[in-house]
Image (tube, grey):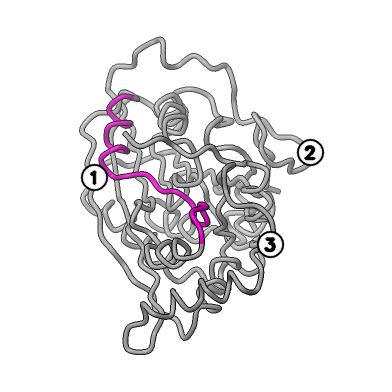
Amino acid sequence: MAELPMLDKRRLRASFERAADTYDAVAVLQREIAGRLLARLEVVRLKPRVVLDLGCGTGYAARQIVKRYPRARLFGLDIAASMARRARHQSGLWNRMTGRSVFACGDAERLPLAADSVDMIVSNLTLQWCDPRAVFAEAGRVLRPGGLLMFSSFGPDTLRELRAAWRTVDAAPHVHGFIDMHDLGDMLVHAGFADPVMDMEQLTLTYADVKAVMRDLKQLGAHNVARERARGLTGRERFARFRVAYESQARDGKIPATYQVVYGHAWAPEKRDEKRGARDESWKPVTALKGISRHASHQED
């Protein structure tokens, strides 16, 4: 298994905090992948009472989940307080008034939920910003026996054109590292999940120029947050070399950005290993959103 990148969570949170106002304008691919992920629920017979949208962003997937399961209570969790606030604002008046949808700020690797409290976890394009081993362990803890975990993530071939262009400039890691589909499947098994199913597809966006690619990534908050990332300013000369290398990969005058999309789902075992359900924490409100926290920050009226 490939070595997992060590992530700078402060930078991760700050990136997505800044991106909340611009995210929806450029998140075309993210919405498309969310739709493809949620379409997989067509064959799932589970009727959840409680659903966790893990890494809810501005709430697009949450709104689709509520439409699919109108009787379920939905919790949306995001590492960025500004994302959770926007998701709450866009969740609809009925959901805000009834408390059917609750949005909060918290860490996917330390879920502020009690053991055996959730029937389904849906996570769209969040896992790549986490240590999947910690996320799967926490998902296994909070899911009720027989509960479902369904997620999408990006694989290591994501942004391959961008990576190739930077390699002509230097050997520093300018692009976030992503985890292989098979490694994610192995992690699911190791975490105790049953019947894991993994599949993958490639989607390519095209842009008018290199600056448009970089602008989209910035507005999405999709920065390289590995601790060993390149530091400091790039410099005009080095960026010019990078741009020329990227432009050389143009197709029909368009600049490509390829995304390797990984989908996975697995089931919490019907019989819990008692050693795995041991954290005495519940969804506890606090007065203000505080970012990465062991307890959630409430976002309901």
Looking at the image, residue 256 sits to the left or right of residue 264; the answer is right
Q: Position of residue 200 (x, y in %)?
A: 25, 54
Give me the C-alpha separation between circle 1 and circle 3.
39 Å
Residue that label 2 marks = 287
Looking at the image, residue 71 sits to the left or right of residue 203; the answer is right
Q: Quadrant of residue 37?
A: bottom left
Q: Residue at x 35, y 51 (%)?
A: 156
Looking at the image, residue 39 sits to the left or right of residue 69; the answer is left
Q: Quadrant of residue 196?
A: top left
Q: Residue at x 51, y 76 (%)?
A: 243
Q: Depth check: 179 or 17 in front?
A: 179
Of helix, strand and loop, which one carries label 1? strand
| Earlier residue among tags 1 and 2 | 1
Of helix, strand and loop, which one carries label 3? loop
Q: Depth check: 262 or 124 in front?
A: 262
Which mark's residue is nearer the viewer, 3 or 2? 3
Q: Which mark is residue 198?
A: 1
* Magenta region, residue range: 170-190
Q: Position of residue 95 (x, y in %)?
A: 57, 54
Residue that label 3 marks = 233
Amino acid type at image mark 1: Met
Amino acid type at image mark 2: Thr
